[in-house]
Amino acid sequence: MSYLLRLVVPDRPGILGAVATALGTAGIDIVSLDVLERGNGVAVDDVVVDLPPDRLPDSLITVAQGIPGVQVESLRPFAGPLDTHRELELLESLSRAGAGTAEKLLAAELPRVFHAGWAVVLDCGPTVGWQVIAASDAAPAFDDVELPWMPLTTPRLLPSEDDWVPERWREMMIEMMATPYGGDGCAVVLGRSGGPAFRRSELLRLVHLTGIAATVTYLPPA
């Protein structure tokens, strides 16, 4: 079974090699690694690993934190497809999709790009307030949920402890981030249950990706 391991590690040469060696010695295979951010002497990495059937998930934490200075921020099962070019593939697909289906494609594909659980696209109309115009599988129901930050004008992190978050979402520890997309008041919301919380570097990446997506969607056909 695959798991997503988020590590906070000292930002120094050789540390990822030490992590890979420790995991390999324990029979744990690294499938992919994404460096989320670096600064203040540490780096935050998302590592997808395959765990042998005879190993417990907690052994991942034990092995990783056996390396001096390494901390496990979160560990959760991972079932999404892996692709090192997933962002480019999404943009290429959007360029062929056109405005009519682009939002559905964006909602469906963004979760795998960001190792998230779900995505929705919200439209803030001129007369009827906001509405969900596209949603991925596993997205929670936004019906009757008050969103005080809509219409969205700037990107923002939406942690599970915010006052507006419904109690049932808090119990699921749903972490979210959102960015404007496609028009006045429209937004893309990305979320995952059980954490980890989205980081500023992930939000900036979402801003850049959706900005390019909004551009390529409305390009004239080649």
Image (tube, rainbow, N blue to C red):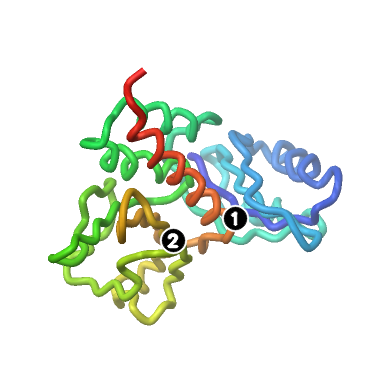
Please, is residue 150 above or below residue 125 in the view?
Answer: below
The type of residue carrying mark 1 is Ser
**What residue do we see at 31% from left, 52% from top?**
183
Image-based side of 119 in relation to 63, left or right: left
Residue lying farthest to the right in this orientation: 13
Q: Is residue 138 above or below residue 213?
A: below
Query: At 43% from the left edge and 68% from the top edge, which residue is drawn?
Result: 158
For this view, does 218 lie left or right of residue 75? left
Closer to the N terminus: mark 2 or mark 1?
Answer: 2
Q: 88 left or right of 44?
A: left
- Label 1 sits on a secondary structure element that is helix
Q: Which mark is residue 165?
A: none
Can you tell which quarter of the image residue 171 is in? Answer: bottom left
Rendered position, 222 above or below 152? above
Q: Residue at x 43, y 50 (%)?
A: 116
Q: In the image, residue 173 lies at what x, y percent?
A: 41, 68
Residue shown at 43% from the left, 45% from the top:
210
Q: Position of residue 168 (x, y in %)?
A: 29, 73
Which of the pair 17/161 is nearer the observer?
Answer: 161
Viewer-side residue, 21 vs 10:
10
Total marks shown come to 2
For mark 2, give the secondary structure: strand
Q: Nearer the viewer, residue 177 or 12?
A: 177
For badge 2, the amino acid type reads: Met
Which label belongs to residue 177? 2
Residue 201 image label? 1
